């Protein structure tokens, strides 16, 4: 990806040329490496009777078979990259079964490159396979599995249910056909069963648990070691996920971390990590025909950062058009209020955190309310799906030092401009909708597509 603040799909495509060159170079090296010297062949024939040499031969055969599988996977990914580049260049894409007869085809200014996105999504549906490690038993380390979390409200559980179920469309039949490997590490389980407030060493037992789990997989299978974890991913909506991922340097630096905490100042890297939107299955309240509230913020939690505190200090209870609550009063419905608001305020940074900003933005979009990100200069929140969606086209950004001017800024947006923003919010709403089972282009499949894009940007050195 080209940018720390947003990884555009078209930037992904620019990188594909270098990936293809790397793949070609790797194939050339492999072709040269397959030629053995006569001396080597003679040495093998002399020692073939020894148990040690038979074991070595079996190991070489396993490695050769493994490399053939990887080359086949990489060839398929190279074809996918080429088709995405072609779709972007020709502004067309391959028809797919889901886009006919009323199916959805991405289009419009909300996308960085709608043609590339549609082709990439089609390639993902056709090719992408995931292997989930079975090692580890709940509840101490790993997730309980898809069947046990299907009823959960959190996006984490629904995504895992789709990865492990989903009609089997994503599941690899064996590790050799997998493009990516799912590490079923549960940060929530680790915190619940290992963490104690009176522990002398606050983090060490949890970090050792994660490191030991990854080391065990690396010792048993070749897949972690072949890529140093770059084609592996884990999923967590827990606020400690960035901390526990540091248990293994390669897990933090190389693996695809799918996290709700998408704060780049906390180590989130949009090039390799995926912002997991905070969603639930609650249906939004019906939108009012007239949105009489200019801007809305309702806290709902006791803690918050400096941006939120500044927002409350300036606006709470002070204006009937900029409606701000530190905690929503009893008897008021948050969804109903958002249905009457033009703009919904999403403070970023501080203890409020990136996950809270994500939750507020998704709630706003679900209610047809234009999200307004209020952030200090040092805040660096990466919105979900920013490699595909151009958030500037359907949201508003306000610097934290202009909290006092929010009413003037938002009131200064013309009715025509607001109507355009509102239409675009309604256009992207399908990408943040949670369905069980998952549907094409919904939030679960958009997260899977984000993982696919990051795997697509990786070329294994074989």
Image: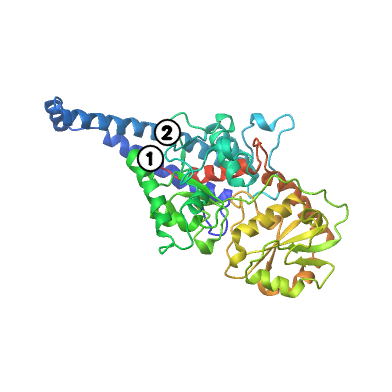
Q: Is residue 175 visible?
A: yes
Which of marks 2 and 1 precedes in the sequence?
2
What colour-coding does the image apply?
rainbow
- The residue positioned 68% from the left and 52% from the top of the image is 362
Q: Mark 2 Cα within 10 Å, few/some/many (few <14, many 20+)?
A: some
- The residue positioned 65% from the left and 45% from the top of the image is 153
Instruction: Tell me if label 1 and label 2 are in contact, CB under 8 Å.
Output: yes
Residue 15 in the image, given as x and y percentages of width and height: 49, 49
Which label number is shown at residue 175?
2
Is 189 or 115 nearer to us in this picture?
189
- The residue positioned 59% from the left and 67% from the top of the image is 350
Q: Secondary structure at mark 2?
A: helix
Q: Alpha carbon of mark 1 to alpha carbon of mark 2: how far?
A: 8 Å
Residue 277 in the image, given as x and y percentages of width and height: 62, 51
Residue 69, above or below 328:
above
Q: Secondary structure at mark 1?
A: helix
Kindly give the residue lying farthest to the left in the view shown: 46
- The residue positioned 53% from the left and 61% from the top of the image is 264
Q: Quadrant of the C terminus?
A: top left
Q: Is residue 16 visible?
A: no
Check disc 1 and report the residue beneath it: 223
Kindly give the residue lying farthest to the front in the view shown: 198
Q: Mark 1 Cα within 10 Å, few/some/many (few <14, many 20+)?
A: many
Residue 139 in the image, given as x and y percentages of width and height: 49, 44
């Amino acid at each position: 990806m080209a940018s720390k603040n947003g990884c555009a799909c078209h930037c992904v495509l620019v990188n594909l040329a270098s990936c293809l060159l790397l793949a070609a170079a790797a194939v050339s090296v492999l072709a040269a490496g397959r030629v053995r010297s006569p001396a080597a062949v003679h040495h093998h024939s002399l020692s073939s009777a020894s148990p040690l040499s038979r074991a070595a031969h079996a190991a070489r055969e396993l490695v050769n078979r493994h490399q053939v599988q990887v080359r086949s996977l990489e060839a398929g990914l190279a074809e996918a990259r080429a088709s995405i580049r072609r779709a972007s260049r020709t502004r067309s894409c391959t028809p797919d079964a889901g886009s006919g007869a009323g199916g959805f085809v991405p289009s419009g200014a909300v996308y960085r490159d709608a043609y590339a996105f549609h082709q990439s999504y089609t390639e993902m549906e056709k090719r992408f396979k995931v292997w989930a490690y079975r090692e580890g038993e709940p509840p101490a380390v790993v997730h309980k599995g898809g069947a046990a979390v299907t009823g959960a409200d959190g996006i984490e559980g629904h995504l895992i249910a789709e990865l492990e179920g989903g009609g089997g469309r994503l599941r690899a039949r064996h590790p050799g056909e997998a493009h990516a490997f799912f590490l079923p590490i549960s940060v929530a389980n680790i915190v619940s069963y290992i963490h104690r407030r009176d522990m002398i060493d606050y983090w060490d037992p949890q970090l050792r648990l994660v490191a030991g789990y990854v080391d065990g997989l690396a010792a048993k299978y070749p897949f972690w070691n072949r890529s140093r974890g770059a084609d592996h991913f884990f999923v967590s909506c827990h606020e400690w996920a960035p901390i526990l991922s540091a248990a293994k340097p390669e897990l933090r630096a190389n693996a695809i971390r799918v996290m709700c905490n998408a704060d780049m100042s906390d180590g989130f890297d949009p090039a390799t990590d995926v912002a997991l939107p905070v969603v639930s299955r609650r249906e939004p309240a019906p939108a009012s025909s007239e949105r009489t509230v200019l801007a809305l913020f309702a806290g709902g939690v006791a803690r918050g950062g400096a941006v939120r505190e500044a927002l409350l200090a300036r606006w709470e209870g002070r204006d009937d058009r900029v409606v701000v609550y530190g905690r929503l009063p009893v008897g008021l419905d948050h969804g109903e209020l958002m249905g009457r608001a033009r703009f919904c305020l999403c403070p970023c940074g501080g203890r409020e955190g990136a996950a809270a900003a994500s939750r507020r933005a998704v709630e706003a979009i679900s209610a047809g309310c234009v999200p307004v990100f209020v952030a200090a200069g040092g805040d660096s929140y990466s919105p979900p799906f920013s490699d595909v969606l151009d958030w500037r086209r359907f949201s508003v950004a306000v610097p934290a030092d202009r909290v006092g001017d929010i009413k003037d800024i938002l009131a200064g947006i013309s009715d025509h401009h607001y109507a355009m923003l509102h239409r675009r919010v309604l256009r992207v709403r399908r990408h943040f909708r949670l369905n069980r089972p998952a549907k094409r282009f919904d939030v679960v499949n958009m997260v899977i597509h984000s993982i696919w894009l990051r795997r697509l940007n990786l070329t294994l050195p074989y």
